Image: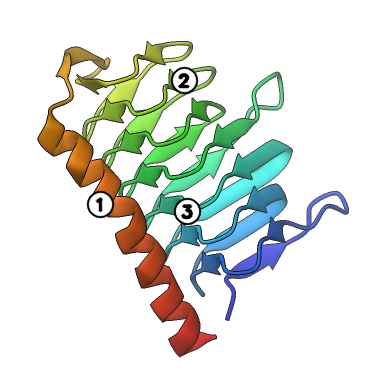
Amino acid sequence: MAGLIYPYNGVLPRIAPGAFVAPTAVVAGDVQVGTDSGIWFGCILRGDVNAIRIGERTNIQDGTIVHVSSRANPTYIGSDVTIGHGAIIHACMLEDGCFVGMGATVLDGAVVAVGAMVAAGALVPPGKVVTPGQLWAGMPAKPVRDLTESDRRTMAATVPHYVELARQYLKEIG
C-alpha cells in the first residue's frame, strides 16, 4: 500500500519500484522518489510550486516535511541520505551520504554537503553550506567539529538498516 499520492497541476509523483511510501505519508506534485528509499509515516512531500527529487536508498523518517520555493529553489535530496524524525527540509540541497538529525531545519538555498551531518534540532539558515565531513549544530547552525570515525560508521549503518526496514514493510503491507 502506498501513501496518499496526489497530482498537482497535472503532474503525478513518480515513485520508483522498491521505494516504500508509508500509508500515512502524503506525496503531491512534481516529486520523484528513488529505488529503495523510504518515506515514513506522517511525512509530507509537497512538490507543488517546484520539484522535489530524492535519490536511492534515502530514508525520510516519520513526521518530516519536505517542501520547495516557487521563486528559485527546488529541493534535491541525494542518495544514501538519512533525515531524522520531524525535520523540515525546505527548498535546499542535501547531497549524497549526508545526515540530518531529528527536528532539524534546513532552509532555502542551503546545502548539506556529501558526508556532512546536521545535529538534531539545528537550524541551517538560508544559503549556508554545511561542509563535508563536519558536524554542524545550533540555532543558527555552525561548525562544531569534524566527524569522528564512529559518526561515519553510524551514518553508513543507518542506510542499509532503513533499506531493509522498508523492504520488510513492503512485504507486510504491500
Q: Which residue is mark 1?
A: 157
Task: Identify the secondary structure beneath mark 3.
Answer: loop
Query: Badge 1, how many Cα within 10 Å: few under 14, some, many 20+?
Result: few
The disc at residue 111 is: 2
Q: How is the image coloured?
A: rainbow
| Distance (Cα) linking label 2 and label 3 | 19 Å
Q: Which residue is mark 3?
A: 57
Sequence-first disc among 1 and 3: 3
Residue 91 percent across, percent down from the top left: 57, 28
Residue farthest along the right direction in this orientation: 10
- With 154 as the anchor, is 166 left or right in this view? right
Query: Badge 2, how many Cα within 10 Å: few under 14, some, many 20+?
Result: many
- With 67 as the anchor, is 83 left or right in this view? left
| Residue displayed at 49% across by 70% down | 22
| Residue displayed at 47% across by 46% down | 65
Residue 44 percent across, percent down from the top left: 52, 53
Kind of residue indicated by mark 3: Arg
Q: Quadrant of residue 1?
A: bottom right
Task: Kindly check if marks 1 and 3 are in contact, taking CB atoms under 8 A apart as contact.
Answer: no
User: Which one is nearer the viewer's eye here, 131 or 105?
Assistant: 131
- With 49 as the anchor, is 73 left or right in this view? left
Examine the rendered structure and indicate whether residue 91 appears above or below residue 33.
above
